Image (cartoon, rainbow, N blue to C red):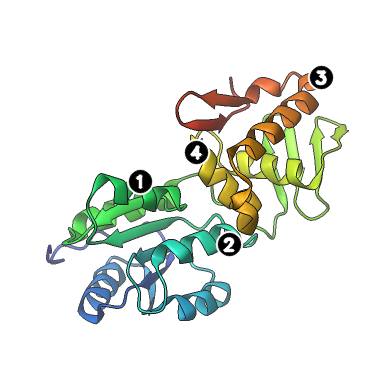
């Protein structure tokens, strides 16, 4: 692992939660990030992390795959179902380096994936990249906008310009997910886990049917093409053509 003799300073103070049961690795990461200007908290298991996240509202998570009471995969899937914290950028850290492991980690909802032994300089670069992504969502502002589309999470209303669009609960949740992840491609499994959560056993067809309905609703506003099918992968969303 790299030393940190030349720290890469954070552009602004950000809160990072490191969830890692290997104490030397956890403390080394925490010290390195602290020296770079981040505020860092640590914990060693999923149970503690689930308590810390609502209390500390971290700007980014570093999550080990193998934890003593559960797994980083389970923690990230839980996080993506929490309306107030589902958009927290998450980097998975693990010794598992096979391609299938990386795919499973990313499909669980992780935003990035690093294998051990890790480069601390690369870790800093990846954290900075995650924190620069425009998908951050402030629940206190309630309003999400994309082009002519506006979504208010306080009253669950959707507008195109000055016209209200009537959606079912799942149609609303699906559109909200797309608007918060604009210009990114997501698999059906990722969408299913994020929007349906514990009902994810319903299957891919559930997503296809709801997207068909959502496109039909948006068509009179010429926004049906905002939801794009990415062959062999899943879907993406953009109001910018």
Disc with the residue nearer the chain's start (4 vs 3): 4
Taking the spot 34% from the left edge, 64% from the top edge, the residue there is: 65
Q: Secondary structure at mark 1?
A: helix
Which quarter of the picture shows residue 22? bottom left
Disc with the residue nearer the chain's start (4 vs 2): 2
Location of the C terminus by quadrant is top right
Taking the spot 60% from the left edge, 59% from the top edge, the residue there is: 81
Judging depth in this view, the residue of 163 and 173 nearest the camera is: 173
Q: Nearer the viewer, mark 1 or mark 3?
A: 1
> Neighbour class for label 1 at 10 Å: few (<14), some, many (≥20)?
few
- State the separation of the CA atoms marked 1 and 2: 23 Å
Disc with the residue nearer the chain's start (2 vs 3): 2
Q: Which residue is mark 1?
A: 103
Q: Which mark is residue 187?
A: 4
- State the separation of the CA atoms marked 4 and 2: 21 Å
Taking the spot 45% from the left edge, 27% from the top edge, the residue there is: 232
Q: Nearer the viewer, mark 1 or mark 2?
A: 1
> Neighbour class for label 4 at 10 Å: few (<14), some, many (≥20)?
some
Q: Residue 138, can we see it? A: no
- State the separation of the CA atoms marked 4 and 3: 27 Å
Taking the spot 23% from the left edge, 49% from the top edge, the residue there is: 98
Can you say whether 93 is above or below 111 in the image?
A: below
Disc with the residue nearer the chain's start (1 vs 3): 1
Q: Which residue is mark 3?
A: 220
Q: x, y (%) of residue 55?
A: 56, 77
Can you say whether 222 is above or below 118 in the image?
A: above
Q: Secondary structure at mark 2?
A: loop
């Amino acid at each position: 692992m790299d030393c940190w003799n030349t720290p890469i300073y954070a552009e602004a103070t950000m809160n990072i939660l490191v969830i890692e049961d290997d104490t030397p690795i956890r403390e080394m990461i925490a010290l390195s990030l602290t020296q770079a200007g981040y505020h860092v908290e640590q914990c060693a298991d999923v149970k503690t992390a689930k308590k810390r996240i609502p209390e500390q509202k971290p700007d980014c998570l570093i999550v080990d795959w193998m934890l003593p009471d559960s797994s980083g995969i389970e923690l990230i899937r839980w996080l993506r179902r929490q309306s107030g914290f589902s958009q927290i950028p998450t980097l998975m850290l693990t010794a598992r380096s096979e391609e299938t492991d990386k795919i499973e980690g990313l499909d669980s909802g992780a935003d990035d994936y690093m294998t051990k032994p890790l480069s601390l300089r690369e870790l800093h670069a990846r954290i900075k990249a995650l924190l620069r992504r425009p998908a951050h969502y402030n629940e206190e502002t309630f309003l999400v906008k994309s082009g002519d589309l506006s979504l208010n999470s306080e009253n669950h209303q959707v507008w195109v310009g000055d016209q209200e669009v009537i959606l079912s609960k799942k149609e609303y949740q699906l559109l909200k997910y797309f608007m918060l992840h604009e210009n990114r491609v997501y698999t059906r499994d990722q969408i299913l886990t994020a929007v349906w959560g514990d009902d994810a056993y319903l299957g891919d067809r559930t997503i296809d049917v709801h997207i068909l309905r959502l496109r039909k609703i948006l068509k009179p506003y010429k926004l049906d093409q905002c939801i794009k099918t990415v062959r062999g992968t899943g879907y993406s969303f953009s109001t910018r053509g």
